[in-house]
Amino acid sequence: MMRSLVLFAALGLVLPALAPAAGPDPKAEIEIARLKKALQEAVDQNKALKGRVDKLEADLAEVVKELTRLKAKAGGAGPAKGKDPDAPPNLQGEVTKVDGDLMTLSAGSDSGLVKGHVLEVFRRGAAPKYLGRVRIIEVSPKQSVGQAVGRMAAPVEKGDKVASRVSVK
């Protein structure tokens, strides 16, 4: 019995010491509530950002699709930076107008031309002559505008010919 009294006395001392730990701590409860709220806000923000990322990815896919379609329609992507693209093989046309070092040509994107292509300019007739090169700076379906590359061997005239390459026959 004495043992029981000692045990009850010991429990009487221990239980009050344990009571604050077992009961709610108002400061801890407030901190837990604040952390739960912050966690929920972060989850909501994450969902919103994921939705925005998904929309931007879909928009980007549409832009890439449209760019690919336009490149195919234009006959290519145009010149690579620092490099002249190859003009379509066997392209031939004529100078229809001359204004200084600019000339309008009878070939356009329907013939496969894009900005940056370089064509050879020459004259046929009684005195055939190679005149030089022209770089395409504007393109429409049926015609283009070219600018002389360097100095021409002679002034370009209406009726002079252009081609992707000059062949000697």
Image: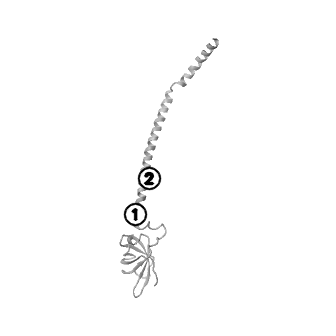
Q: Read off the residue under disc 1.
A: 70
In the depicted view, which residue is nearer to us: 60 or 150?
A: 60
For the residue carrying disc 1, how many other residues have a C-alpha within 10 Å: few (<14), some (14-19), or many (20+)? few
Label 1 residue SS: helix
Three-letter amino acid code at the position of disc 2: Glu
Task: Give me the C-alpha separation between circle 1 and circle 2.
Answer: 20 Å
Which quarter of the rendering shows the N terminus?
top right
Above or below — where is 60 with respect to 148?
A: above
Disc 1 to disc 2: CB gap under 8 Å: no
Above or below — where is 35 with respect to 73?
A: above
For the residue carrying disc 2, how many other residues have a C-alpha within 10 Å: few (<14), some (14-19), or many (20+)? few
Three-letter amino acid code at the position of disc 1: Leu
| Residue found at x 39% / y 72% | 111
Q: Earlier in the sequence, mark 1 or mark 2?
A: 2
Residue 88: x and y in percent read 44, 73
Q: Read off the residue under disc 2.
A: 57
In the depicted view, which residue is nearer to us: 42 or 110?
A: 110
In the depicted view, which residue is nearer to us: 110 or 149?
A: 110
| Residue found at x 38% / y 71% | 110
Q: Based on the displayed image, in which of its 4 quarters is residue 94 positioned?
A: bottom left
Above or below — where is 99 with respect to 40?
A: below
| Residue found at x 41% / y 65% | 72
Above or below — where is 18 with respect to 137?
A: above
Residue 41: x and y in percent read 45, 39
Label 2 residue SS: helix
Q: Based on the displayed image, in which of its 4 quarters is residue 104 positioned?
A: bottom left
| Residue found at x 42% / y 52% | 56
What's the mark number on residue 122?
none
Residue 113: x and y in percent read 41, 71
Residue 161: x and y in percent read 40, 80
